[in-house]
Image (cartoon, coloured by chain):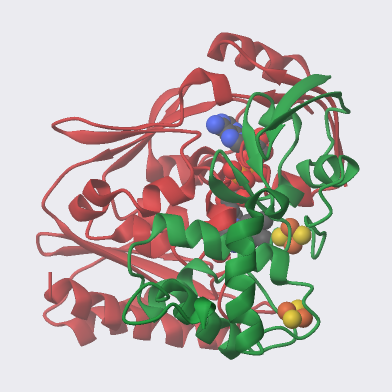
Chain colours: A red, B green
Amino acid sequence: MLRIQQYQKVKSLAEAYELLQKNKNNQIIAGMLWLKMEDRTIPVGIDLSDLDLDKIIEDEKSFVIGANVTLRQLEVHQKLNLWTHDVMKDAIKDIVGVQFRNLATIGGSVFSRFGFSDILCALMCLKCEIVLYHGGKMDIVDFVNSDFQRDIITHIIIYKDHDKRCFICHRNSATDISALNLSVWQRGDEYLITVGARPQKAKQYSITGNNNEEIANKLKAQVECSGNMRASKEYREALSYGLCLKALNKIGEQ
Amino acid sequence: MKINIRVNGKMISDDVACDMLLLDFLRYHGFYSVKRGCETSNCGLCTVWLDNKPILSCSMLCAKCDGHEITTLEGLKKDAEAFAYFMANEGAEQCGFCSPGLIMNVLAMEKELQHPTEEMIKNYLAGNLCRCTGYMGQLRAITKYLNRHQGGKNEADQ
Ligand SMILES: Cc1cc2nc3c(=O)[nH]c(=O)nc-3n(C[C@H](O)[C@H](O)[C@H](O)COP(=O)(O)OP(=O)(O)OC[C@H]3O[C@@H](n4cnc5c(N)ncnc54)[C@H](O)[C@@H]3O)c2cc1C
Ligand code: FES
Ligand code: FES
């Protein structure tokens, strides 16, 4: 059960950051969907809702997404999905239900760095940066591999480009978390293929090849998976081949 | 902490614990349509609207709703009754426990999606679990309800 002793709707990021440093148990409360599942006491719950971080702002080069933007806002944002070949929509649409996605935030999803995260796997096939209040900008891949810092994600920036990309995942049953997820980013002759829910956190592989089968086979030979209650190591490896082939075929149609 | 929440158009001011869930707040104030199911954000039974968008009241702090507007099934009586007619006609309920959350989300979907396909309906309602029916009766009722103004007589008037 989650217990919160004090709840603070902060007026500035500086105030939020100070509260975060004051006590290592103080926590930012975003969608609270994950936090609520934990058994812990939070001395001060920090709410960023008054800081105008719930907007997606498009400019010439990018989409600047506030940390408090909900997954549903991203799922239905037509221009973002048009620019990114529906990558965000495809990663989000099967996460529990609409009511859930109206609460869960991109900031909470990125910060948590879940191994099973569909969202991180999707962001890794985009030119994407995480903006931290104290730490500044960080490339998404570096962020995923970094240690947890007591910092605040303020924005996520997705840069526009004309590369082809695709996200795909396999669930054992609807609304369950993925048994494996995979994204492909085609950059010239190179395919950056990210595999998540291995079940460890998402890892990116750079692969080249003459045809889709060859690329999928190379991925299957390199991918490091292990087994858990959702899928065995062998099943995940076989899935990586199948999903990769499917994703490459989809990219071929873009 | 002191909060002011407008529920179904009526302002409620209260002094609540920081970690009180919206679900408990609403039930405490007599909105018994709001039910507790899984309490792990999975079943959709506790669905209410926050500023007209469907959310899970089991996973929301009432502190966070301070200054906002909540709608429960009690505030949508007329629409709920219209939909309930189609549910009854299709034999879409068994124990009926999931119905309040389902109805809240169907009415939200009706406002948000224009002419949804069957696939869009299924996607929108994926977060509303029913342990009894197998969903087919519900799907028939929802489709007929959404099409009620198209072609000929309104079934509810027959
Ligand atoms: C039942 C369930 C099923 C799920 N299924 C899936 C799935 O299929 N696929 C998937 O990808 N994800 C899934 N998730 C994860 C979910 O989508 C969210 O990623 C998760 O709930 C975290 O988002 P939140 O807004 O609820 O964060 P919270 O629970 O509020 O916070 C999570 C953590 O992030 C910190 N935090 C929040 N915002 C910030 C910020 N701006 N800066 C720094 N730290 C911050 C919090 O302090 C906390 O430590 C699931 C979660 C649940 C509970
Ligand atoms: S009780 Fe809220 S989702 Fe089940
Ligand atoms: S009718 Fe019993 S849970 Fe849906």
Is residue B131 toward the left or the right of residue A195 in the image?
right
Q: Is residue B93 above or below residue B10?
A: below
Is residue B50 toward the left or the right of residue A46 in the image?
left
- Residue A160 in sight here: yes
Query: Dividing the picture into quarters, in which one does residue B96 lie?
Result: bottom right
Give the residue displayed 18% in from the left and 42% down from the top.
A160
Q: Which of B33 and A25 lies nearest the eye of the viewer?
A: B33
Q: Position of residue B30 (x, y in %)?
A: 87, 45
Query: Dividing the picture into quarters, in which one does residue A207 lie?
Result: bottom left
Q: How many marks?
A: 0
Q: Residue furthest front?
A: B158
Q: Position of residue B98 (x, y in %)?
A: 73, 72
Q: Which of B85 and B52 lies nearest the eye of the viewer?
A: B85
Q: Position of residue B62 (x, y in %)?
A: 75, 34
Give the residue displayed 71% in from the left and 64% down from the top.
B100
Give the residue displayed 58% in from the left and 70% down from the top.
B83
Q: Which of A187 and B51 lies nearest the eye of the viewer?
A: B51
Quadrant containing the C terminus of chain A is bottom left
Q: Is residue A49 above or below residue A250?
A: above
Q: Which of A79 and B102 lies nearest the eye of the viewer?
A: B102
Is residue B7 toward the left or the right of residue A49 in the image?
right
Query: Dividing the picture into quarters, in which one does residue B87 lie?
Result: bottom right
Ligand 3 placement by image quarter: bottom right
Q: Is residue A116 above or below residue A6?
A: below
Q: Position of residue B56 (x, y in %)?
A: 67, 52
- Residue A202 in sight here: no
